[in-house]
């Protein structure tokens, strides 16, 4: 019992001292010190009350909350949180997120107020996965690749495979593997010596035999590029070294496509009979045939993009220059090598120019693609062309300050029927975008890259939609080391 300060007698009902109450309140997680207003102060000390709340959706680690400058970490998977020391009634408080968890964003509701003469338990922290997350940042030195200008593919084992133009053990580029969780493994470092390829700038494909196939811009026996095969375990073989002679192409910038006949087809940016590039065929054992050499009028060209085999069995592609207006073209070529110019860009002031991306064929049989320049705003386009060569501009980039610009990469058609792609510049931060466009041409910026150490920048490769429904891609810059990243975009 406590003696009364006035009479020296025990206080009525055995009331405890203010000091005892403060110690008891500070010791409990959710304050039980919810006495009436008559017990809020004794000897000038205010009674304190607990501040707590709930947490929902937190799966990652690293969340730190702040209560008026005092910080508190919150464990992954937490469902409730007790927020630091209790506060006296009448004290203003603010709860905010000091540090976001990895790959998630959290917000605080009911986080600002004034402590009543009772505990506050309704602070609500809600977390959700980020729309975009960086799975891996390339290191660019020795074992790390850099400058991922090529799209990923998802292998039959569920992992993603890709190439980097530079980096690796010899500085000549790499083939890498990365799991959907972001664990990266270097499969092969190109040497650029003794006949090996160097500086791959195109995506891989997985052949019907389970091996991976690709091209390099440089290297090979003649330093004019190579076609290579690599097993999923990382054993590489050069199938063919391009020579750049009048009978052969050089500098392949595009990935291969495996035709219905089992052979591989692609393009070279240079070489051939006139030096303006080629379309070639190569067997799985490495026997190469030049099907067509670009040059002359109206198809002096230099193709940078891969081919696509249409539903009619013919191959379709683009060139970044040439055509009737010198602004690039869409062409078709039969497996026997008969080429036809379907459409020449630059036909109008609002037409696209300089296509660099592979076409895709939609369910209606039309071909869709992008141009990095031209269009109503001069910032590139999305276009559609029929097999008969009738072209329509579906969208002109640069329609607003936050819109993407310079679309170098091909489109993909998502499982929702819409088309998705990237722009290497533009967006809210000027570092490029991921965009969605409906078949009718209505475009939405899905994500704007921010660059710097925490995000990628300047994507110039196509997206892929993984087996989980999410989208995956690469950027040539940004990330922790500035050498590009692999990123994931959640499906909406």
Image (tube, grey):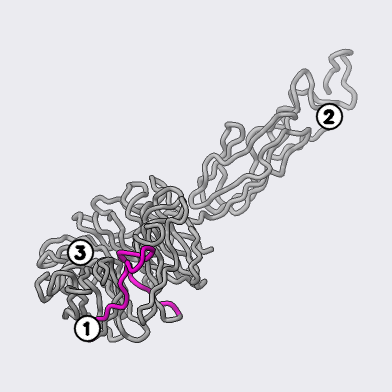
Label drawn at residue 37: 2
Quarter of the figure that contains the C terminus: bottom right
Position of residue 411 measured from the top left corner of the image (x, y, whole percent): 40, 68
* Secondary element type, mark 3: loop
Residue 153, visible in the rendered structure: yes
- Point out the tag, 3 or 1, that comes first from the N-terminus: 3
Q: Which residues are magenta?
A: 336-363
Residue at numbered disc 3: 217
Q: Is residue 59 left or right of residue 364?
A: right
Disc nearer the start of the sequence (1/2): 2
Q: Quadrant of residue 338?
A: bottom left
Left or right placement of residue 401 versus residue 289 in this view: right
Q: Is residue 486 visible?
A: no
Please say if 419 is above or below 124.
Answer: below
Nearer-the-camera pick, 483 or 183:
483
Residue at (36% x, 52% y) in the render: 137
Image position, residue 409 (x, y; %): 35, 64
The kind of secondary structure the magenta stretch mainly shows is loop
Lower position in the chain sequence, tag 3 or tag 2:
2
Report the disc number at residue 337.
Answer: 1
Please, what secondary structure does the residue beneath circle 1 have? loop
For disc 2, the neighbor class at 10 Å (few under 14, some 14 to 19, many from 20) is few
Rendered residue at 68%/42% (across/down): 110
Image position of 413 (left or right of 141): right
Mark 3 or 2, closer to the camera: 3
Q: CA distance from mark 3 to mark 1?
A: 23 Å
- Residue 306, how many percent across, how many down? 29, 72
Q: Nearer the viewer, residue 408 or 287?
A: 408
Q: Is residue 52 left or right of residue 132?
A: right
């Amino acid at each position: 019992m406590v003696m009364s300060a006035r009479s020296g007698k025990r206080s009525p009902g055995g009331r405890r001292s203010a000091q005892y109450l403060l110690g008891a309140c500070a010791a409990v997680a959710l304050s039980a010190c919810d006495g009436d207003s008559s017990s809020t102060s004794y000897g000038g000390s205010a009674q304190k009350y607990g501040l707590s709340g709930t947490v929902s959706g937190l799966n990652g680690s690293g969340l730190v909350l702040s209560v008026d400058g005092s910080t508190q970490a919150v464990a992954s998977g937490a469902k409730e949180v007790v927020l630091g020391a209790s506060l006296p009634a009448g004290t203003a408080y603010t709860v905010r997120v000091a540090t976001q968890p990895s790959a998630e964003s959290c917000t605080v509701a009911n986080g600002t107020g004034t402590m009543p003469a009772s505990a506050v338990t309704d602070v609500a922290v809600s977390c959700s996965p980020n729309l975009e997350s960086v799975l891996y940042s390339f290191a660019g030195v020795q074992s790390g690749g850099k400058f991922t200008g090529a799209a990923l593919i998802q292998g039959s084992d569920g992992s993603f495979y890709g190439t980097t133009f530079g980096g690796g053990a010899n500085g000549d580029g790499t083939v890498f593997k990365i799991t959907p969780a972001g664990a990266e493994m270097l499969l092969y470092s190109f040497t650029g010596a003794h006949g090996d390829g160097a500086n791959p700038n195109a995506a891989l494909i997985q052949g019907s035999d389970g091996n991976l196939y690709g091209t390099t811009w440089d290297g090979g026996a003649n330093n004019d590029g190579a076609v290579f095969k690599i097993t999923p375990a990382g054993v590489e073989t050069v199938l063919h070294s391009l020579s750049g002679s009048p009978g052969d192409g050089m500098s392949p910038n595009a990935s291969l496509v495996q035709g219905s006949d089992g052979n591989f087809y692609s393009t070279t940016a240079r070489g051939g009979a006139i030096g303006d590039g080629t379309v070639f065929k190569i067997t799985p054992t490495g026997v190469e045939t030049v099907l067509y050499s670009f040059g002359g009028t109206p198809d002096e060209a230099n193709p940078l993009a891969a081919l696509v085999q249409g539903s009619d069995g013919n191959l379709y592609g683009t060139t970044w220059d040439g055509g009737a207006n010198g602004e690039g073209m869409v062409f078709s070529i039969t497996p026997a090598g008969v080429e036809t110019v379907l459409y020449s860009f630059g036909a109008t002031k609002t037409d696209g120019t300089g296509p660099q991306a592979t076409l895709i064929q939609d369910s209606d049989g039309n071909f869709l693609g992008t141009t990095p320049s031209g269009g109503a705003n001069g910032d590139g386009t999305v276009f559609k062309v029929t097999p008969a060569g009738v072209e329509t501009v579906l969208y002109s980039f640069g329609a607003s300050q936050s819109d993407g610009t310079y679309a170098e990469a091909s489109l993909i058609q998502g499982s929702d029927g819409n088309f998705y792609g990237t722009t290497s510049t533009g967006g809210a931060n000027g570092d490029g975008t991921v965009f969605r466009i409906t078949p009718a041409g209505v475009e939405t910026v899905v994500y704007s890259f921010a660059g710097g150490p925490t995000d990628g920048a300047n994507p110039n490769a196509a997206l892929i939609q993984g087996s989980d429904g999410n989208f995956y891609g690469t950027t040539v810059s940004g990330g922790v080391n500035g050498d590009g990243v692999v990123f994931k975009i959640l499906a909406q």
